Image (cartoon, helix red, strand yellow):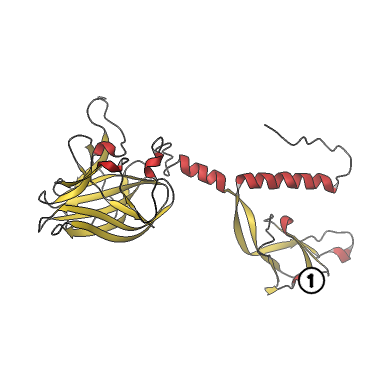
Amino acid sequence: MSKTPYNSLDSEDILAGHLSGIQQDINKIQNVLDMKTGTKSGHSLEPVADQDDLALRYRIYEATERNWLDSPVPSIYRNGLLVVTSEYILQAPYGTIVFHEQQNSNDNVTADFTHINNVSKIITDMNNTINTNSSNITQLIKPNNYAYLHVAGYYRTNNIINANIETSAPLDTNIMELSMFVVAETTTYDDMAIRCSYASAGSYARFGLYDDNGSLYPNNLLADGGQVEANVVGVKNFLVSLTLEPGIYWFATITSDNMAGWSFVEPSTLPQFGMDGSLVGSTAYGYEVSHDTATPLESIFPSGAGKRFIGSTRHPSIFLRKV
């Protein structure tokens, strides 16, 4: 690791070059970290009023929040009124202004400014890649993170191999079936859809989306596509306005009977979350709970849902369109 070879200055005077070197180092670190900025309005500035020369008091005003940017230009106010820039010298990096003339001791001096804050975009992005939800479920989308890439204007479902999307599956009757949908980056969606591939008048489905409670279990309802009839073959759409942060979400689907056919995926291609202590048999990939298609989805997903396991079961595929 390379480091600037600073030495103790001992008793020699601090030179401008010393401070300039430190400032350059700080700027290099800020560039590497890609620091984020914040804004302050009405931030109080405190006067430096302890000089021996009384004429110098109430000329220098300092902020408690430093590291201002000089663009956009900070605005300085005295007793609520904007101060013209010709009245002072601005030292933005230090959060300091120096008035040419002494101010009254009871003046209230404030500032509006943009400043460097203590959040790094680089570190935030790294954390978002590693942590997929609030309970730090790490590495979930690796090594198959490529599977969650999504092009704007196109739909994708929750399986990791799109070639495994099939059609005309009769599904379990009046059972809400849920499976994971992993979002790898902050994404906005405008449409949620399911495809009816075999029509049956009087057959219905309902589909929706839940977020996760942080423990691999559905939680808050984000969208309910309503009850849709399988009277004609085609895509059944439900317009949404969803911006999802990186994490785990849960598609929910219910069908009223097994007369109609709906698009489905093989559960073996879905994200999975474990098997029981026997270490034999099928792996769990989702949840199921009794529910009627005519009944809206619960705003909070009920506790105690049963697991769904990989096997002969087919799982309905819901799609989201990226904006």
- Residue 34 sits above or below residue 99 on the image: above
Residue 269: x %, y % from top left: 28, 38
- In the image, 314 versus 232, the foreground residue is 232
> Is residue 157 in view?
yes
The residue at the far bottom in this view is: 81
Query: What element does badge 1 sit on?
Result: helix
The residue that appears at 79% across and 71% down in the rendered structure is 87
The residue that appears at 80% across and 47% down in the rendered structure is 19
Residue 238: x %, y % from top left: 27, 60
The residue at the far front in this view is: 163
- Using a 10 Å C-alpha cutoff, classify the residue at mark 1 as few (fewer than 14 neighbours), some (14 to 19) or many (20 or more): few
- Does residue 260 appear left or right of residue 78 in this picture? left
Q: Please identify the quadrant where the C terminus is shown.
A: bottom left
- Does residue 175 appear left or right of residue 77 in this picture? left
- Residue 217 sits above or below residue 60 on the image: above
Q: Please identify the quadrant where the N terminus is shown.
A: top right
> Mark 1: which amino acid?
Glu
- In the image, 146 versus 88, the foreground residue is 146
- Residue 306 sits above or below residue 319 on the image: above
- In the image, 179 versus 194, the foreground residue is 194
Question: What is the total number of numbered labels drawn onto the structure image?
Answer: 1
Residue 254: x %, y % from top left: 19, 51
The residue that appears at 65% across and 64% down in the rendered structure is 72
Give the labeled residue for mark 1. 87
> Is residue 104 in view?
no
Residue 251: x %, y % from top left: 28, 49
The residue that appears at 74% across and 46% down in the rendered structure is 24
- Does residue 118 appear left or right of residue 94 in this picture? left
